[in-house]
Image (cartoon, helix red, strand yellow):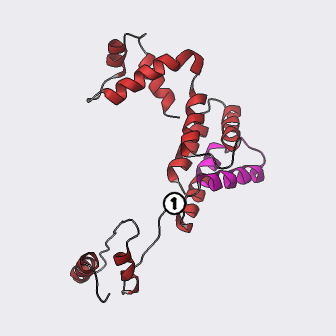
């Protein structure tokens, strides 16, 4: 690294300092940085691109979805090829985003009955193929409760959560909001989807 920046120099010094320790490894995470990229030619330095658009991220998300959907649908879906195709489609939609993938898994998993799990997966795969994370959250929340009946309570509970500077139990939230006992707990449990 000729003409290295301070950052590159510091990383090389750190790497040299731990060599006597034997098999010690250092993990450095960063946004793409030119000076760190210059280290790629150094011995014992491995640089991986872990952005959501990287091949590694795409593969990791696909593996995560395959494993979890296989677990969720074990004994439920008779046609494994159909499930595999749906998982491939879902992985493509997730586009390397683990948050998108894990939200999809939780949403699907929280179906009460086997039929509901299939319906939830189909709902995720319905609509546009470029569904944003925001739209995924909207799908999950709209499916988790009857909005016509629960919208006011939902807004109150979420507003209190956003404005409150300390943790509150669901019972205390019910008292502050002067709503029926158990309402805050029910709203919060529905949000985990």
Q: Is residue 110 left or right of residue 113?
A: left
Q: Residue at 45% of width from left, 16% of height from top? A: 183
Q: Nearer the viewer, residue 77 or 88?
A: 88
Q: Nearer the viewer, residue 82 or 46?
A: 46
Q: Residue at 71% of width from left, 33% of height from top? A: 115
Q: Quadrant of the N terminus?
A: bottom left
Q: What is the crowding at mark 1: few (fewer than 14 residues within 10 Å), some, or many (at least 20)?
A: some
Q: Is residue 8 left or right of residue 79?
A: left
Q: Quadrant of residue 17?
A: bottom left
- Residue 112's x, y, as percent? 62, 29
For label 1, the residue is: 52
Q: Is residue 181 left or right of residue 127?
A: left
- Up-down: is 60 above or below 44? above
- Up-down: is 96 above or below 155? below
- Residue 4's x, y, as percent? 28, 83
Please count the marks in the image.
1
What range of the chain is rendered magenta? 66-94
Q: Is residue 157 visible?
A: yes
Q: Is residue 75 visible?
A: no
């Amino acid at each position: 690294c000729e003409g290295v920046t301070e950052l590159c120099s510091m990383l090389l010094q750190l790497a040299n300092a731990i060599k006597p320790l034997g098999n010690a490894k250092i993990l450095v995470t960063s946004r793409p940085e030119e000076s760190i990229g210059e280290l790629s030619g150094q011995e014992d330095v491995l640089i991986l691109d872990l952005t959501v658009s990287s091949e590694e991220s795409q593969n990791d998300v696909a593996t995560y979805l395959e494993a979890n959907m296989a677990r969720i649908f074990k004994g439920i879906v008779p046609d494994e090829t159909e499930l595999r195709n749906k998982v491939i489609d879902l992985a493509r939609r997730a586009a390397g985003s683990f948050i998108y993938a894990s939200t999809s898994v939780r949403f699907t998993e929280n179906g009460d009955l086997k039929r509901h799990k299939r319906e939830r997966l189909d709902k995720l795969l319905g609509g546009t193929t470029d569904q944003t994370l925001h739209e995924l959250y909207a799908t999950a929340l709209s499916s988790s409760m009857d909005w016509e009946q629960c919208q006011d309570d939902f807004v109150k509970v979420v507003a209190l959560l956003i404005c409150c500077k300390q943790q509150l139990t669901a019972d205390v939230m019910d008292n502050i909001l002067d709503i029926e006992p158990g309402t805050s707990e029910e709203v919060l449990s529905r949000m985990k989807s």
